[in-house]
Image: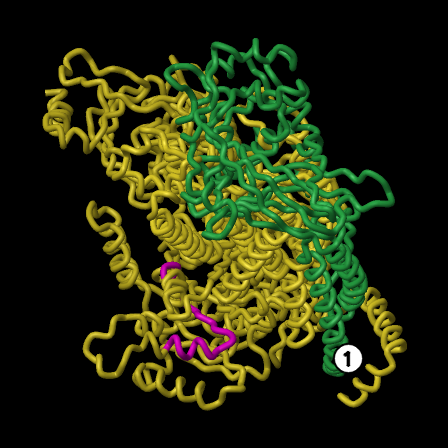
Chain colours: A green, B yellow
Amino acid sequence: MMASSYNAKEEDGHPSGASGHGGPGVVKSKKPDNTAFKQQRLPAWQPILTAGTVLPAFFVIGLIFIPIGIGLFVTSNNIKEFEIDYTGVDMDSPCYTCAKNSSWNNTTPCTCSVDFTLEQPFESNVFMYYGLSNFYQNHRRYVKSRDDSQLNGGRSALMEPSKECEPYRKTDGVPIAPCGAIANSLFNDTLELFHIDSNGSRNAVPLVKKGIAWWTDKHVKFRNPGGNNNLTLAFQGDFSKPVNWRKPVYELDPSDPENNGFINEDFIVWMRTAALPTFRKLYRIIQKKSSTTPTLPSGKYTLDITYNYPVLSFDGRKRMILSTISWMGGKNPFLGIAYITVGSICFFLGVVLLIIHYKYDTRNNSADIPN
Amino acid sequence: MDFTLLRNIISRYCVGEENWVDSRTVYIGHKEPPPGAEAYIPQRYPDNRIVSSKYTFWNFIPKNLFEQFRRIANFYFLVIFLVQLIIDTPTSPVTSGLPLFFVITVTAIKQGYEDWLRHKADCSINECPVDVVQQGKVVRTQSHKLRVGDIVVVREDETFPCDLILLSSSRHDGTCYVTTASLDGESSHKTYYAVPDTMAFRTEQEVDSLHATIECEQPQPDLYKPSVLICEFLHVFYSCRPLGAENLLLRGATLKNTQHIYAVAVYTGMETKMALNYQSKSQKRSAVEKSMNAFLIVYLCILISKAVINTVLKYAWQWSPDRDEPWYNHRTENERQRHVIRAFTDFLAFMVLFNYIIPVSMYVTVEMQKFLGSYFITWDEEMFDEELGEGAQVNTSDLNEELGQVEYVFTDKTGTLTENNMEFIECCVDGNVYIPHAICNGQILSAASSIDMIDSSPGGYRRVSQRISKLDNKTHLLESSEVYFLNPDCVTSTNNTSEHEDLFFRALCLCHTVQVKEEETVDGIKRGIHQGRPTSFYISSSPDEVALKLHTRIKTLGKRFHQRLLHVLNFDSVRRRMSVIVKSSSGDYLLFCKGADSSIFPRVVSGKVEQVKAREGLRTLCVAYRRLSESEYAEACHHLTEAKLALQDREQRLAQAYDIIERDFVLLGATAVEDRLQEKAADTIESLHKAGMKVWVLTGDKMETAAATCYASKLFRRSTQILELTKKRTEEQSLHDVLFELNRTVLRQHCLDFGLIIDGATLSAVLKPNQESAGHGNYREIFLEICRNCSAVLCCRMAPLQKAQIVKLIKASKEHPITLAIGDGANDVSMILEAHVGIGIMGKEGRQAARNSDYAIPKFKHLKKMLLVHGHYYYIRIAELVQYFFYKNVCFIFPQFLYQFFCGFSQQPLYDTAYLTLYNISFTSLPILLYSLVEQHVTMETLKREPSLYRDIAKNSLLRWPVFLYWTCLGVFDAVIFFFGAYFLFDNTTFTSNGQMFGNWTFGTLVFTVLVFTVTLKLALDTHHWTWINHFVIWGSLLFYVIFSLLWGGIIWPFLNYQRMYYVFMQMLSSGPAWLSIILLITVSLLPDVIKKVLCRAMCPTATERAQVGCFANFQKFGEFFCQIFVFFANDETIFFGARK
């Protein structure tokens, strides 16, 4: 403010000094440029949302959304899904005793088996999930309780895990690998599926444990310290296993060095914290063997469970889910219904707007004429 | 004995501390007193440096930070940031620290830049050259090196570098002429006098030989009451002489018409009156800012209640220890021990989590919008005035949007509505009216044509010719004033005129302050056509006089008067007249008086008053005279000299003396000049009226003149019923009755178009607090009620302060309307400062108004574009900006709030840190900033053509509570859609084709992606003016979001201790249903707003919306075409519509 006032004074006060460099040039430079931008006259497209212009959009949306919705809905309905709760809350459920006795202190595994029947055959690849309810994997204290650089095989982070891992950071001064609440609470039930033949014999259904984690997670984000061989060497001595674990990290899958240690896929899947307290995680994949026979023919099945994971203390539930997958994922009618609904609403609104457009536009036009 | 007096004075002033402060002793030319004066105390004065800048290089950072954190919003974010640093919060300190840093940096850069400009301005002022007398020689130095006591040489047209006491001047009478246009806006030449003892000094050596001191008061800001100065001359005179205001030259004033002066500096630098008078303008706040703050408070309440609700729910939910600490999720020992403060930290953590609902970047965006947006005003070519060579000027950018909210316009008349360019219209002598020939024939005068004066009164035909001269617009100087008689008849005819006529012209010739300035220089471009000839300038304190002078020379050139000017009774604005006493060649003493009719008529004893009175509607000056006898003259002389010599109350006693002398006049006649209306003034006023603004004219002129201008400017129309509230009426009836009668008239006939005329005297009666007649109710209220029903009000005979009073009165009335004051002179400054928006016209009466205003424009007509186009645009832009900011932050934060219900109230943020940080400062900031700079919902032409569109935004209509509620609800709705859309998609299933599951970060990223797209597209829907920049910024910022997300998730970032976002975005995009749901959710979120817009437009379109459709017929046709096709196919529906019709 003051600056401008002094400028003005200068003009009034010292014409001799000011005109030395100015003269008519000063006047010219003061004149604003006649550019489209400065004069706010840039060429512009000026759309306006009137009933007339929006109408086509509504019909188009309606016409596109409804078929998509129907497609999605049909796809979702074609997906076969089977879900079974094996928590063992009720007295008559097979896992009742296991559920009651299970705690982290138990060293002897408790097993139970649940029988179920598939009414319809599962034709394509079947994905086997375990589901947990009321398990707050998205709790803030839980989500942050991990050390990504440790999981990435960082040497320094191995020795000195991040503060965020507290209280699962060290035991008796020895760093825990992998540290943190998430790793500590790794889901450790073992699920096995058996097909009961018509003659009553149990046939183990082959479960594939690869390809359940994101490729990038397995190959980039998670890495074993010092390569995948000699894991025992890399981890032994200096580290302790997480408190709740029965076996150290280098024994997660001793049969396959590509699936052991931090890059164990079950571990990686667990480490991706779920968004909601009721969630499922991919456990195994049942691959389709031949094009003629269904992956899982209809019939009787038994699920053998090594029951280690206690959930009753926080009123949780455990489930096993078998599901086929389409291009749009698992069974979820929501998207299809939503598309159909929105499409119909748009179409309906289009009709309403058409009425309005006809009724009011004529009125407006007649009103405009006297103006 | 020599120094007794000095010693006395020094001891009087220097002994007591408080006395010492009262005055200062200035040693002229730094000559120390002789060693005998033991009481010499060197005083320290500041140098002549002017400092208007706020910061220095060193204190910029601390001082600026301090200033910025004094703002409540910044302080709030600082507190949030500190909380994040101290306690364990869900989001990292970076999320609020970075935006805060960004905001603070941007503001600091802006303020630093402004301060740098001020530094530059200061520098150029401080370094301008000044001539100082040192050791008898003139030495050139820089202005800031001046010290108190320096003797300065100032040449013509130079400004005084500091406050000076005039010692001697190049003029022989020891006077100099000065304009104070840049100080108080008066462009007239004022006479200042040298100290009588030194006025004889001619050379530097003489001046330098002076040994003297000046005692003067410590600096005071009062411009018009200068300190009493005592000059103490040692060695030379040993005397003491009182000095007054006429000896003190103020910094900023300009020397005119005097070759050079010698003067001594008494006040320098920041102690000069000009610097002391500069007071920072009171901060005006716009209505938008007020509603913005109100909204902020609402949001703060929402924020706190959200945090409280969540804290309470958290503790209710985790009552059972299994929920609080299930086996898989234990607390650390430390956390367990902190029972007491845990609830409080939880509350703070929720506050931190939701704090983004208070948009951190809103203030900085608003500030940037205002700062950058104001450039469009200065760039506007239509508001550039070729004559002046200047365009509009923005002094504060804080009020841009207020220009779109104006309800009352208070305008000055002279110089604002009119040109302030006086033109002689006619004169009336003894009842005979003389008018220039050209006007008589209805022709338009061209500047160089010759005009005949024709006596249009019956009985006489005389013709006087004259070559018209043009008045220079800026300086009132006559350019080529070769005025002479063309017609020799005229000379003879003048001889035959009546005595009165003779006297009339003699009076006009003598009774003036016009000075003729002869200038020999040849300046072909500047000085006009008469090259080589001596050119004369008329310099006067009144533009009226210049106009008159031009015409009266006609008469005087022919005859030679031998008369001696004896006394001048100077003009002052209280008396509104001036007089001269002359001794004519015949030995008569004559007193000529010239002044405003109202001040002359009461003193007239004879003369044709009626004819003069009939010349209504023109700006008239009456001329009267009185013959003085020898004894009367002697008495008058006695009165005058006595008064002039008085040491105390000189002004008052002079006034008394004038009052005694100026009486018993004989009226000679009157002259009339006209002030032409500014170009397009009427059109502008008409537009303002149509825009729903009430225009008030406030003028110091008399009623008839002002009313005529009002009719000419279409403020009053033929159909306007005029209500008068003037002194004339209140003299007949009591004020009370008049007021009530007017009120009844106004209320009875509502449809009529009323105009009110009120004069200053009545106004002060109305505004006077009503002590006795409390029973009669408050006049103020009745007056306001009348005004409310009048479309136009004219206030005449107003004192400058009354103008401000009126503005204040309207401002304080119960609707609290937004007022705008526009004026060009120093007398309008008070009202410009008082009104919500003050606009100055860069007029003739100095730059005082322009400097004190918020905006300055060259001409009154520019007000139309300023308000109707710029004001309108700025208002809708900033309204959208404010609402949109709140909206987008509700959309942003409400899903986080909802997420707390699904994560055990654990303050788990839904979005990644990078998204939290960058949402406001980069993903969604630029489109809205650009919108708020270039949006034009209606074309400029339409706005100008249809002023009534201005009514659509009146009364802050876009920022009222219902609108705010709508935006907030829309935000909440959208947030619910985002969150639950994602929730149901994630609900216990997978949506990838390989069966793999997504985690909580994918959930957040999905919500965030929908959020960014929706919020940006919502703005795109609101944009009515798509330039290439809009396309670039809107699509660019969406693209930027995508690219950023790809990059952010594409690399294992080595410096981060978490890699939670690794490949999350890409994995999400690899899933078809994610795409589908993003599209679906965006559509659903935008749907209600589109429907609302379309329905509102169809059902009850505003004037603006109608105007928009006008220029949008083509696209409309496409829509209709589509409708027809549709109807064609759906035959049933046509029948249905047919039935409906």
> Can residue B699 be seen by looking at this rendering?
yes
Residue lying farthest to the front in this orientation:
A199
Which of the pair B1079/B854 is nearer the observer?
Answer: B1079
| Residue displayed at 63% across by 46% down | A321
| Residue displayed at 29% across by 30% down | B197
- Residue B377 in magenta? no
Q: Percent x, y for residue B406?
A: 52, 63
Which of the pair B312/B528 is nearer the observer?
Answer: B312
Quadrant of residue B577 in the image? bottom left
Q: Chain of mark 1?
A: A
Vertical placement of residue B196 versus B724, above or below: above
Q: Percent x, y for residue A114?
A: 58, 46
Vertical placement of residue B1000 versus B48, above or below: below
- Quadrant for the C terminus of chain B, please: bottom right
Which of the pair B6/B905 is nearer the observer?
Answer: B905
> Can residue B537 be seen by looking at this rendering?
no
Disc 1 is placed on an element classified as: helix
- Quadrant for the N terminus of chain B, please: top left
Q: Percent x, y for residue A369?
A: 76, 81
In the image: residue B1119, left or right of residue A155: right
Looking at the picture, which amino acid does disc 1 mark? Tyr
Q: Percent x, y for residue A36?
A: 75, 46
Q: Which residue is mark 1?
A: A358
Q: Residues within 10 Å of mark 1 (few under 14, many from 20)?
A: some
| Residue displayed at 19% across by 78% down | B772
In the image: residue B538, left or right of residue B806: right
Quadrant of residue B250 in the image? top left
Region of the chain picked out in magenta, as a range = B783-801
- Residue B787 in magenta? yes
Vertical placement of residue A114 versus B959, above or below: above
